Image (cartoon, grey):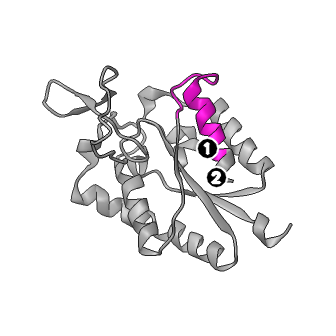
């Protein structure tokens, strides 16, 4: 294997360990197998960080929107969780590996890449359910999940640029969104 072939990615933990997902959303082991098998066949090393939702709130947490996680305590928790993965990224880069991308999870308030408008629940706070009828205005800023946002900031501090991809786990395998994800991942590798 030549130096240029040494590749790594950063990935949200629930894409490797589906048990980390909010319990009522269920686990998607077939998708985990598909993602990990694809990456391993391509000789891509995987760096995952601990799930910030699980480590902050446990496995039996209720689903929440980005708004509920957007606080100084959770942001600090995310920064702490990224310390070791960022050390690993720096070590791999120092040894001529290429960071190909980050893979987050669609509609995740922490690891999502495109957090759109969400419904508001009866308490006046953001629901984890997206507003399906809403059309994103191209001029509106696209929010990332809290962890994805912090990861982007940490990478920027190091001068590291890499694509942020979002796995559309809720879309059918033959959907255009899922096909586009696999094309974008192939391009990143």
Q: Which mark is residue 184?
A: 1
Please name whichever residue, 112 or 176, is drawn nearer the observer in this view of the structure.
Answer: 176
Please name whichever residue, 124 or 178, is drawn nearer the observer in this view of the structure.
Answer: 178
Residue depicted at 17% across the width and 34% down the height: 125
Highlighted magenta segment, given as a residue range: 168-185
Give the SS element for disc 2: helix
Residue depicted at 78% across the width and 64% down the height: 5
Q: Tell whether label 1 touches label 2 (CB within 8 Å).
A: yes
Give the SS element for disc 1: helix
Q: Is residue 145 above or below residue 162?
A: above
Q: Is residue 93 above or below residue 12?
A: below
Where in the figure is residue 143, as x and y percent of width and height?
32, 46
Q: In which quadrant will I find the N terminus? A: bottom right
**Crowd band around label 2 with a 10 angstrom C-alpha radius: few (<14), some (14–19), many (20+):** some
Q: Is residue 130 above or below residue 41?
A: above
Residue depicted at 29% across the width and 35% down the height: 137
Please name whichever residue, 22 or 111, is drawn nearer the observer in this view of the structure.
Answer: 111
Splitting the image into 4 quarters, where does residue 67 fall? Answer: top left
Which residue in the rendered view is the most extreme toward the front? 139
Residue depicted at 39% across the width and 36% down the height: 60
Q: Which residue is mark 2?
A: 188
Q: Is residue 10 visible?
A: no
Residue 107 horizontal side relative to residue 175, left or right: left
Q: Look at the image and say whether residue 49 sits in the magenta stretch.
A: no
**Crowd band around label 1 with a 10 angstrom C-alpha radius: few (<14), some (14–19), many (20+):** some
Q: Is residue 106 visible?
A: yes
Residue 42 horizontal side relative to residue 157, left or right: right
Q: Look at the image and say whether residue 172 sits in the magenta stretch.
A: yes
């Amino acid at each position: 294997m030549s130096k240029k072939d040494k590749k790594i990615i950063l990935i949200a933990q629930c894409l490797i360990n589906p048990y980390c997902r909010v319990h009522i959303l269920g686990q998607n082991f077939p998708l985990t197998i598909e993602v990990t098998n694809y990456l391993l066949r391509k000789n891509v090393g995987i760096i995952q960080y601990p799930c910030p939702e699980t480590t902050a709130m446990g496995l039996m947490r209720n689903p929440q929107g980005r708004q509920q996680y957007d606080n100084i305590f959770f942001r600090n928790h995310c920064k702490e969780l990224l310390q070791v993965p960022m050390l690993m990224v720096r070590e791999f880069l120092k040894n001529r590996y290429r960071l190909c991308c980050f893979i987050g999870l669609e509609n995740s308030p922490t690891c999502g890449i495109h957090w759109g408008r969400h419904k508001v629940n009866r308490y006046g706070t953001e629901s984890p359910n997206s507003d399906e009828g809403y059309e994103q205005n191209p001029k509106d800023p696209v929010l990332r999940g809290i962890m994805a946002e912090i990861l982007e900031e940490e990478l920027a501090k190091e001068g590291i640029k890499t694509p942020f991809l979002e796995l559309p786990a809720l879309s059918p395998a033959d959907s255009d969104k899922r096909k586009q994800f696999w094309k974008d991942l192939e391009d990143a590798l």
